[in-house]
Amino acid sequence: MEKQFLINAFEKGEAWRLFKIIGEFVEGVETLQDIGPAVSIFGSARVNADDPIYKKTEKLAALFAKNGFAVMTGGGGGIMEAANKGAAEAGGTSIGLNIILPHEQIPNPYATIKLDFKYFFIRKVMLIKYAMAYIMMPGGFGTLDELFESVTLVQTRRIKPLPIILVGSDYWSGLIEWIKESLMKNNRISPEDLDILQIIDEPEQIVKTIKKFVII
């Protein structure tokens, strides 16, 4: 039976597991290195198809596809499904990087390029490395992890200052206020660090903003 707690599974004599990690990196690089301009869309797996944010994500992904961008997601349901569906039905490249979990995540059927990962950190590297912008739809702990990973990499100049867009001012404005009041006022971040993030609500404006950074 496959062990559930993979990070804790590194016991004495289990260095061979590193080859599985290397294998996931190799498969990811080989599959994604030629996808062209792409955006990664992050967000909750717990969003139903009749939710307005699902519809907005679907529309946004379709606009990206029509403007020459591949769309990458974590490959699951909810917002990830909406993004893959929008891109695929618009005739674009729809990429799903699914995480293998003992429960919850089932790959959505709309990805035209699919990869499965056991390790979250490898999947996250691929979603960041091969995208030219990061779109954060409303989500939970996983989305917050991906958000702050992206912000930290830009802040520390480990990656280029690519756009990080928070979609939904009603959802994200409280977080931005907390960052200002708790982080910036206590000198935990610099004022210019706030410029890494943008809140934009309208799909058309999001695509227009991203196109300023990329020549298709």
Image (spheres, helix red, strand yellow):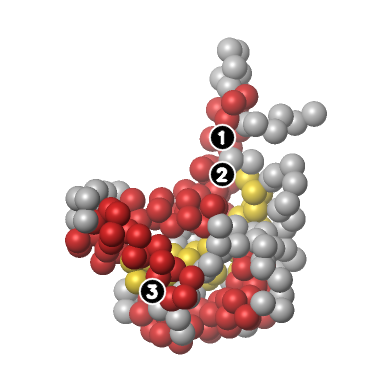
- Is 76 rendered above or below residue 9? below
* Label 3 or label 2, whichever comes before in sequence order: 2
Q: In the picture, residue 133 is in which quadrant? A: bottom left
Which of the two marks, 2 or 1, is nearer to us in this view?
2
Residue at numbered disc 1: 21
Could you tell me which secondary element the residue under label 2 belongs to?
A: helix
Q: Which mark is residue 120?
A: 2
On the image, the x and y values in percent for residue 65 come to 54, 79
Which of the two marks, 3 or 2, is nearer to us in this view?
3
Type of the residue with mark 1: Ile
Q: CA distance from mark 1 to mark 3?
A: 35 Å
Could you tell me which secondary element the residue under label 1 belongs to?
A: helix
Query: 62 or 76, which lies in front?
Result: 76
173 relative position to 9: left or right: left
Residue at numbered disc 3: 199
Q: Which residue is located at x 59 percent, y 26 percent? A: 8
On the image, the x and y values in percent for residue 142 come to 55, 52
On the image, the x and y values in percent for residue 119 come to 59, 40
User: Residue lying farthest right?
Assistant: 1
Type of the residue with mark 3: Ile
The crowd level at tag 2 (other Cα within 10 Å; few <14, some 14-19, many 20+) is some
Could you tell me which secondary element the residue under label 3 belongs to?
A: strand
User: In which quadrant of the rendered image does the C terminus lie?
Assistant: bottom left
